[in-house]
Image (tube, rainbow, N blue to C red):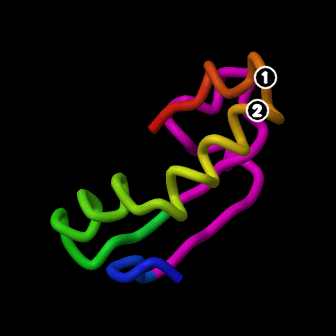
Amino acid sequence: MIPGVLRVQTGAVPAAADWSNRPDFDLGIVITFRDRAALRRYEKDPRHLEAMRRYSATAGPAAARSII
């Protein structure tokens, strides 16, 4: 696990989500960080960057519709 990451949750987008009326989203990923500094470190961590590179390569157009 990347330092500062407290929890990672994945699953179907709940109906109660504010953007649940968007039919093109069917999976949600929620990452909880210790603090904002941990988020900033995560954004630059080579493991995160590699995961995003792999996701973008395999998801194709779907990657462009990601909400972060």
Residue that mark 1 sits on: 60
Q: Quadrant of residue 39?
A: bottom left
Nearer-the-camera pick, 5 or 20: 5
Which SS class for mark 2? Answer: helix
Whole-angstrom CA distance, mark 2 to mark 1, is 6 Å
Q: Horizontal placement of 54 versus 39: left or right?
A: right
Q: What mark, if any, has residue 57 been given in the picture?
A: 2
| Label 1 packing within 10 angstroms: few (<14), some (14-19), many (20+) | few
Task: Report the side of 3 relative to 12 (left or right).
Answer: left
Q: Amino acid at mark 1?
A: Gly
Chief SS of the magenta region: loop
Q: Which residues are magenta?
A: 7-30
Residue at figure coordinates x 42%, y 82% from the top left: 6
Q: Position of residue 55 (x, y in %)?
A: 72, 42
Residue at position x 53%, y 83% in the image: 1
Q: Is residue 32 above or below residue 22?
A: below
Q: Residue drawn at (45%, 78%), measured in percent from left and top?
A: 2
Residue 67, position as x, y percentages in the image:
51, 32
Foreground tag (2 vs 1): 2
Query: Hey, what amino acid is under mark 2?
Result: Ala
Quarter of the figure with the C terminus: top left
State which quadrant residue 3 falls in. bottom left
